[in-house]
Image (cartoon, rainbow, N blue to C red):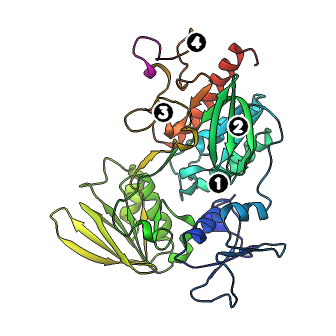
Amino acid sequence: MFDYDSRPVTPSVVLIGSRASVDAYAIRDFLTRNGRPYDWVDADEQPPGEDARLPLVTLPNGARLEGATVETVAAGLGMIAAPRLSEYDLTIVGAGPAGLAAAVYGASEGLRTVVVEAVAPGGQAGTTSMIENYLGFPGGISGSQLASRATTQAEQFGAEILLARPVVGLDFAGGRFLTRLSDGTRITARALISATGVEWRRLDLPGVDRMLGAGVYYGAGPSEAPGCRGAHVVIVGGGNSAGQACMRFSRYAGQVTLLVRGPSLAASMSQYLLDKLATTENIEVRCGTQVVGVEGDAHLEAIRVASRGGTEETVRASALFICIGGVPRTKPVQALPLVQDSSGYFVTGTELASGGMPEGWPLARQPLPLETNLPGLFAAGDVRSGSIKRCAAATGEGAMAVALVHRYLAETGGD
């Protein structure tokens, strides 16, 4: 991995597809976020001249993948690895800041550690163009650089990181956690950390789902930034993620418009980002507005916007990036009966029970901090109820979770 905006100019993969293809977008996003340079050929402008199933991918070794998927591309590039061990001390699900921090501390302290990640290291933080308030980086660091360095560090200590295979099942029996991946891989471990983070809240409007990957995107869409050169880009959201997306796309787009539902950004965005938005000439911030519709056939052409007073207007735009907050990504570990709060986040530690033991808790002690209602399964980072939604906080929880895993393993006789 490396900074998205400093990709090598000589690609080694050719991807042919339609801009309106969700599958092609998924592959572009996967390659970009994993630092794999590629050439994009728009089949709508340059048909491949043959009866090939799109997306079509040509690999460095000359192999051709028709009807390509993220999984087949990852396998073709040698990114799919089998677990090296039959059993681990610790499985970490998710390779965002919390998961990567847990991997670094787990492996460096002698735990046999494996990390499972469905797309790419970094999580949502990995798509951030520049983090300027992260301790120790006074000049700022991009999310992709931070993820890349953390990945390298974890692997240097011996952690395994398995990519491009989402978790499809999770069981607990005989004191062991069995994690099943989409390709049939099985991983056994004595403890598990869920660091699955959050996913973008969906914008429930007609036409949005139909245009996903064809002008409508959730998150910052780093793979799409170079293709927005000179275009009008609209970003929806009022938090730091939306502000950082504005700064990324302002480097390419002719005009960036930020739509904010609330009356101002003061309560939801860091001051350093507010200052940058105010001094970037091609960024316009419009508060008290919201998207009420999208227009276009094969690709996004316009967005319908309503002001607080109810006045509607049509804004011509070629891309819409939706950054309206997150919902917990609990599906990877949903098979287990874990307690969740009213918003779906995992409840941990003393919050599981007020003044007593959680219902069904099998041990004499109370749950450790960050421990769920299943002994040995910890939650760290944004997926945990009550967590602070900041990169540094997630990193700290990942490190703390490993210390608690040591305590759990010691009491079960294996640390």
Give the SS element for disc 4: loop
Q: Mark 2 points at which residue?
A: 104
Q: Which of marks 4 and 2 is in front?
A: 4
Give the SS element for disc 3: loop
Q: Is residue 71 above or below residue 311?
A: above
**Res. 200 mark:** none
Q: Earlier in the sequence, mark 1 or mark 3?
A: 1
Measure the C-alpha gap from mark 4 to mark 2. 29 Å
Q: Mark 4 points at which residue?
A: 363
Q: Is residue 218 above or below residue 272?
A: below
Q: Which of marks 4 and 1 is in front?
A: 4
Q: Mark 3 points at which residue?
A: 346
Q: Which amino acid does label 3 sit on?
A: Phe
Span of residues in magenta: 351-360
Measure the C-alpha gap from mark 4 to mark 1. 36 Å
- In the image, what residue occupies the spot 65% across and 48% down? 117
- Residue 358 on the magenta span: yes
Q: Please give left or right for residue 33 compared with residue 198 in the image.
A: right
Q: Which of marks 2 and 3 is nearer the N terminus?
A: 2
Give the SS element for disc 2: helix
Measure the C-alpha gap from mark 1 to mark 3. 23 Å
Q: In which quadrant of the rendered view does residue 254 lie?
A: bottom left
Q: 380 or 293, which is in the foreground?
A: 293
Q: Name the residue under label 1.
A: 120
